Image: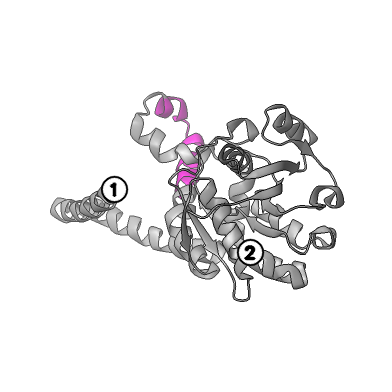
Amino acid sequence: MAEARFGKLVVAGVGMIGGSLARALRKAGCVGEIVGVGRSAETLTKAARLGVIDRAESKWGGALAGADAVVLAAPVNAIIQILTDPAFAAALPAGAVVTDAGSVKLNIVNAARAGLGGKFSRFVAAHPIAGAERSGVAAADENLFHGAAVVLAPESGVDDDALAAVNALWESAGARIAVMDAGRHDRILAAASHLPHMLAYALSAQLAASEQRDEIFACAAGGLRDFTRVASSDPEMWRDIFLNNRESLLAWAGGFVDSIQKISELVEQGDGEALRELFLQVKNTRDKFVAGR
């Protein structure tokens, strides 16, 4: 595994993901000072009290001075705003590497290209495929990334040493690295992550709007809780993900509508054999997936 050594790490967005990365890198002994930046002074104060960061800064000049690495772990729209903020680009040291933790990559890459100018070669887009329905710095876990996949989406022209440094940063947190271009990442994650969240939100909204909701939730067993668990995720984060990956998400959502229509038609027709055969095919596919993990 590559070794990361960063004298000063800046984390913008010290929530569960940013806080977990800060804790993991501190535990690995590969960072010196950790500086937090964010919209909430209360969150930053809590992060310092918990030992997740060493200190907080409210201005980019003070935060970025002497930084070796910057991690943007805010919601997607906030990451885009940071990357296109002239004050951020101006204060960013020429030798610092920048990465992010957003669940959508293409719009973030485009924002970095537009906002960072000549410093774009120091930017390596990333998506840690790890998390939970919990949010906030109090949920930060130094082991969150152990064995988790982190997708890097480096653009052509990125400096070799910047790519190596970002790779080492995430590996030092315990992650497994995969490389994928930004557009392909967004299409794949729309199916693997974003669509399941959409379905969980949709079902939860439908049941919550029902006059029988109290009885439904009182009778809910593990299946409903498991299926809708991710509907307890951060609303701002998932709003940004859906809207920044709308084309791919809507394409997969249309396919789901077709699938549920097919099953509904078989139920309406009373075609038990066709249902059993469909369910068996799906079961075998999912069983192979689970066994291979």
Q: Nearer the viewer, residue 100 or 10?
A: 10
Compared with 88, 40 (above or below) is above
The magenta region covers 199-217
Looking at the picture, which amino acid does disc 1 mark?
Answer: Val
For mark 1, what is the residue?
290
**Apparent side of residue 7 relative to residue 16 in the rendered image (left or right):** right
- Helix, strand or loop for the magenta stretch, by majority: helix
Residue 44: name its quadrant.
top right
Residue 147 image position (x, y, % from top left)? 43, 46
Tell me if residue 268 is in the magenta stretch: no
Q: Nearer the viewer, residue 252 or 152?
A: 152
Residue 56 image position (x, y, % from top left)? 79, 39
Residue 153 appears in the picture as rendered: yes
Looking at the picture, which amino acid does disc 2 mark?
Answer: Ala
Residue 284 image position (x, y, % from top left)? 20, 53
Residue 253 appears in the picture as rendered: no
Residue placed furthest toward the bottom:
157
> Does dot 1 land on a helix, a strand or a loop?
helix
Numbered circle sitting on residue 166: none
